[in-house]
Image (cartoon, helix red, strand yellow):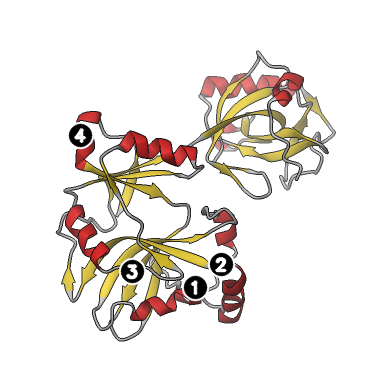
Amino acid sequence: MLATPGRLPPTAQDARWAYETKQDGQRALVYLAGDGSLTLRARSGEDITGAYPELRPLAGALGTAPAVLDGEILALDSRGRADFQLLQSRMGLAGAPVKAARLAATVPVHLVLFDVLHLGGRSLLPLSYTRRRARLEALELEGPFWSTPGALVGHGREALEATRAHGLEGLVCKRLDSVYEPGVRSRAWIKIRNMRVADVLVGGWLPGKGRLTGLPGAVLVGQRAATGLRYVGGVGTGWSEAERVELAALLRAAATYECPFDTVPQAPGARWVVPRLVGEVRYSTRTRAGLLRQPSWLRLRPDLTPEESAADLPDISA
């Protein structure tokens, strides 16, 4: 069951919803056969059990009772926050048990459980979220590499503000009376992603294709650092057609043959520009290398000069 992007439920309906922290990891269904075996499957249906050997002891947590659980596999940074870039080093290793075991010792994962779909040979799919959640919590699945965090009923606005204050990815709102709908992106589950805003300098662009021929398909943006203009990513969404045409004219007027970034980004076919256009972008978080994840263009900032925009930008040279 998948969540639909949206907003907090209306205040008058707040008490009808549960709120869970949105995790930045790999979604997985956990199959416990009751015979000491465990199988993990990704959203695609792929068997990913071999990639996470530290989760195998969960197989015996319920004894002989078979179960199917829903959760998210995370890799945590030094502050205990989910770091998707860390997790990427663990993903895709289902067929490489030696490497998976070695990485499990240095980059262990943690499985966050938030639903139970089958238990003791009975399907719980028709039960309400409230009843399924009660069954899950009664299992007391807490271990060295897995846990069952609590869910908050009501107080959605406070829950969302708490995720923002702690730098977490966002919130998932789940209607208390909702049944579990496998494979459905349901309005009974709503996900809210915390997005951040930053000023950036445009240092290049990639030509568009198809209907975007002659227009920028994406702009390459940077922020000032001690070493110069540090590349922070490519932005390819967020414009109207008219805005893209306007931007194309500005980019052509600023054309240069010299890459303005302190390190040339891996962007075949890039066209470089003098970094004098200031833009505002929305993004979810940064990678450890300082790149913006899921960036989207908001607007040009003609009210800011490159020097003025740099004054409030973080030093990302470390």
Disc assigned to residue 141: 3
Question: CA gap, disc 2 to disc 4?
Answer: 40 Å
Q: Is residue 224 left or right of residue 236?
A: right
Q: In this view, does 113 lie above or below 235?
A: below
Q: How many labels does the image show?
A: 4
Q: Is mark 4 on a helix, strand or loop?
A: helix
Position of residue 27 measured from the top left corner of the image (x, y, whole percent): 41, 60
Question: Compared with residue 44, is residue 173 higher up or lower down, i.e. above or below?
Answer: above
Question: In the rendered image, which quarter contains the C terminus?
Answer: top right
**Residue type for callout 2:** Arg
- Left or right of 179 on screen, residue 248: right
- What number is the disc on residue 52? 1
> Is mark 2 in CB contact (under 8 Å) with mark 4?
no
Q: Residue at point 36% right, 83% down?
A: 37
Mark 3 surroundings within 10 Å by alpha-carbon count, few (fewer than 14), some (14 through 19), many (20 or more): some
The residue at the point 74 percent across, 21 percent down is: 306
The residues bearing labels 4 and 3 have C-alpha atoms spaced at a distance of 31 Å
Depth order, front residue of 79/128: 79
- Marks 4 and 3: CB-CB under 8 Å? no
Q: Mark 2 points at which residue?
A: 90
Residue 7 in view (yes/no): no
Q: Residue 13 carries which label?
A: 4
Marks 2 & 3, CB-CB < 8 Å contact:
no
Determine whether, in the image, residue 268 is placed left or right of residue 88. right
Viewport quadrant of the N terminus: bottom left
N-terminal label among 3 and 1: 1
Q: Nearer the viewer, mark 4 or mark 1?
A: 4
Q: Which amino acid does label 1 sit on?
A: Tyr
